[in-house]
Amino acid sequence: MRLTGLIAIGAIGLVTGCDQLAPFATPPTDAPPPQARPAPVELSAESQKIAAYYKRVEQRQRALDLLRSDGGGPDTPFDNRRLARTFEAVAFSREFSDAGGALVRRRDESILHRWSDPVRIETTFGAAVSDGQRADDMAAVDRLARRLAGATGHPISTVQRGGNFHVLIVTEDQRRGIGPTLKRMLPEIRQREIDVIESLGLSTYCVVVASAPNDDGILTRAVAVIRAELPPLLRLSCIHEEIAQGLGLSNDSPDARPSIFNDDDEFGRLTTMDEFMLGMLYDPKLTPGMDADAARPIVQDMARALTARAF
């Protein structure tokens, strides 16, 4: 299953997993200095087994015509009402909530979250990730950043250092000890979030955590962790969903179609509906911190205008 939510953590049986935890608040800190690239190392035997497992998962998904990349078509029509409902479902709720100090999978209402500062995406790889995979993934993140900037109208770019949205593509061995790296990039992260990320089961493919330091809906930092053992299509699906979720579309909905924000993994890349929702999220008529009730009439007007122009 693929779970999503602002600062949430997601997993999905034998399909792409994506989630988040729930925005936490503490003062921002300066970006950490860049680290030198580690010397290449061999993929461990365990990572090789995990990679073989995920290869079978991707083959199964493709045999079922999942992980589509067409963005939707005649078989996936949607109107303004569906667009508005879907936006409200993914932007104003989260998959995980706090219950007595523990993270539980329970859908909870949330305020609108988005970035105010320019988003600078910095991608870092584990030592065992091959040069070829690094080049492919860097190119994928760069293409996605340009697409997201166009969809949102917000400054979004890739950088080699000084990022405020970190994408970590790491193997099993490195992820199990990733706590210090997460703490350096997100000083406000809690130990329970670190524990979840370090102990992911195979059903969880990727995770994103985003920070709203003042608890006002304004995101300032994010970290996405993606399994390097994933084959190309599953890895690209994680890149698309986790970065988009880290921008503020924090949940999944079973009614989201055509959309990557759906646990069914029908789509493996952002769709036309997803781009509409990202544009709505960053429309100046909405503001960070709004709740669903206050935003609903504005969202409905935007959905009518978007679908009228497109269809």
Image (cartoon, rainbow, N blue to C red):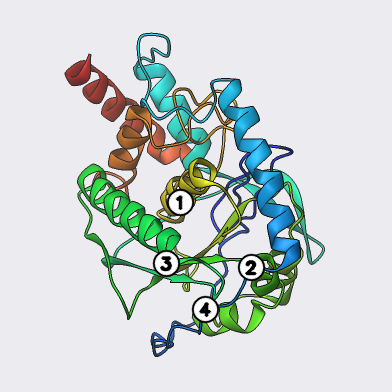
What's the residue type where badge 3 is placed? Asp
Which residue is more in the foreground, 283 or 243? 243
For residue 119, what is the image quadrant? bottom left
Seen as rendered, the residue at the extreme top is 74
- The first of marks 2 and 3 along the sequence is 2
The x and y percentages for residue 296 are 40, 32
What's the residue type where badge 1 is placed? Ile
169 relative to 196 in the view: left or right: left
Residue at the spot of label 4: 40
Alpha-carbon distance for marks 2 and 1?
21 Å
Label 1's element?
Answer: helix
| x 49%, y 41%: residue | 233
Alpha-carbon distance for marks 4 and 3?
9 Å
Alpha-carbon distance for marks 2 and 3?
13 Å
For residue 3, what is the image quadrant? top right
Alpha-carbon distance for marks 3 and 1?
18 Å
Residue at the spot of label 3: 131
Label 2, residues with CA under 10 Å away: few <14, some 14-19, many ≥20: some
Res. 217 in view: no
Alpha-carbon distance for marks 1 and 4?
23 Å
The x and y percentages for residue 44 are 70, 69
Q: Are marks 3 and 1 in contact (CB under 8 Å)?
A: no
The x and y percentages for residue 278 are 33, 42
